Image (spheres, grey):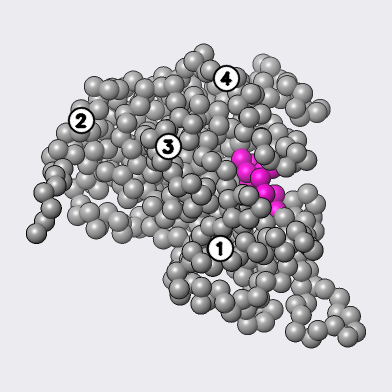
Amino acid sequence: MVPDMHWATPEERRNLGQARRKQVGRQQHDDVKPKARKTPALALLARSMRGRIPALIKLKYQLMAESPFGYFRGAVPVMAADLSVLPSTGIVCQLCGDAHVRNLGAYAAPDGKLVFDINDFDETIRGPFEWDLKRMAASLVLAGRASGHKESAVRETVVRCIERYAAQMRTFAKMPCLEVGRFQVRRLGQIEPIHDALLKAERATPLHTLDLLTEPVAEKAGTDKSASTRRFKEAKPILTRVTGSQAAVVLAGLAPYREMLEPQRQHLLSFYRPVDVAFKVVGTGSVGLRDYCIYFEGNGPTDPLFLQLKEEPASAYAPYLPDAHPPDHNGRRAAEGQRAMQLQSDPFLGWTHFAGRDYLVRQLNDHKGSIDLTDLAGTGLEAYAEVCGELLARGHARSGDPLAIAGYLGNGGGFAEALAKFGSLYADQTEKDWRELCRSGKVPGKAANPTKER
């Protein structure tokens, strides 16, 4: 017998979304309130550096000081605080948390086919759906300015992105629930920047990574013939070999990782033996966190596997979302958020812990390819922006309620226009914050031109 429980009807779910317009109107999302910051941007950044490797903090500031977009990539804690003081819809889904134009990319699915999707979930958490859209809007403006687009064209690009998101969400609201879960965006290969990323991914084979990251080891007389003939090649500070007791600690982290894998993945991993360990500096926002790579061999030296163990602190949004209740393990939070939003995920995706820290585990560079800002010149930006909207809609529909979101968005264009204005205003604020960082003395020899807006 079915328990006496109430399941909300489709009409009730849609009405809930419509009712949230009274909480915050669709055209009210155009506001930015930098004066409402309780903590200055530089102080928020400094707070986020706690627990990071001190020697790499300077490098993170240097990367952020290279450009406004570079700053934006490393300043999620600042934007999380800024979003928290704005009125929100309260319509919750799984957030990517760092939705920007360079955090979508190509990678190999479990069946070996290349897919293109959102692919960075370090900040993932459950929160108001529009927070992802606002971060994407600001990133499109910054990327458009960096790639030489006029301001009017950049704002139109944001409108196209958000309109595409809304149209796709309306479609999802009418589809059977199971169909939403397996929906594929079919036209990706026709978009030039994505086509280029897929070509990069096609070339990024495990053997290509082997040549890129490792080097031959000179064979010595009397050595074990079964020993590997390759090891990581150092390029300090970006890639540094880890040996001895430190390597043993990292390798010990494989034990809890194996336990959380599905049995068939455990079986596959059992054929690979670890050969070498390295410390790798990755991204911009993650610089200063601990990131290790393990080089494995399966059926000999031409069968490499590279796993990345990436330290995951709490999401930057966690202080502002007390009802989110993410898993206690932040590697698990990142992995489960990724699975919730992606259509297909890395078969070796998982988590582990060692030395008192949480880690996400995934394959390194397995058929991965990303977008460069130079790829977005000309007509590339607008076409790419529409895909960003579609993929965010799919991720939010998979992990939230498409009927409630569609009910809130409705059929008008006011929401898209509001987010285009927000994107421009927040990009302006980001440029101001970037200049403040450049003047702060945290990056020796770097000083922004105070009159240079873009």
Name the residue that disc number 3 marks: 132
N-terminal-most mark, 1 or 3: 3
Q: Is residue 284 magenta?
A: yes
Name the residue that disc number 4 marks: 39
User: Mark 1 packing: few (<14 Cα in 10 Å), some, or many (20+)?
Assistant: some
Task: Measure the C-alpha gap from mark 1 to mark 4.
Answer: 38 Å
Q: Please name which of the two marks, 2 or 4, marks the residue nearer to the observer.
A: 4
Q: Residue at x 68, y 24 (%)?
A: 437
Q: Residue at x 36, y 22 (%)?
A: 87
Secondary structure found at label 3: helix
Disc 3 + disc 4, Cβ < 8 Å: no
Q: Is residue 289 magenta?
A: yes
Q: Is residue 179 above or below residue 130?
A: below
Q: Residue at x 62, y 61 (%)?
A: 253
Name the residue that disc number 1 marks: 256
Which residue occupies the foreground of this view, 162 or 14? 14
From the viewer's perspective, is 387 left or right of 90? right
Tell me the chief SS of the magenta region: loop
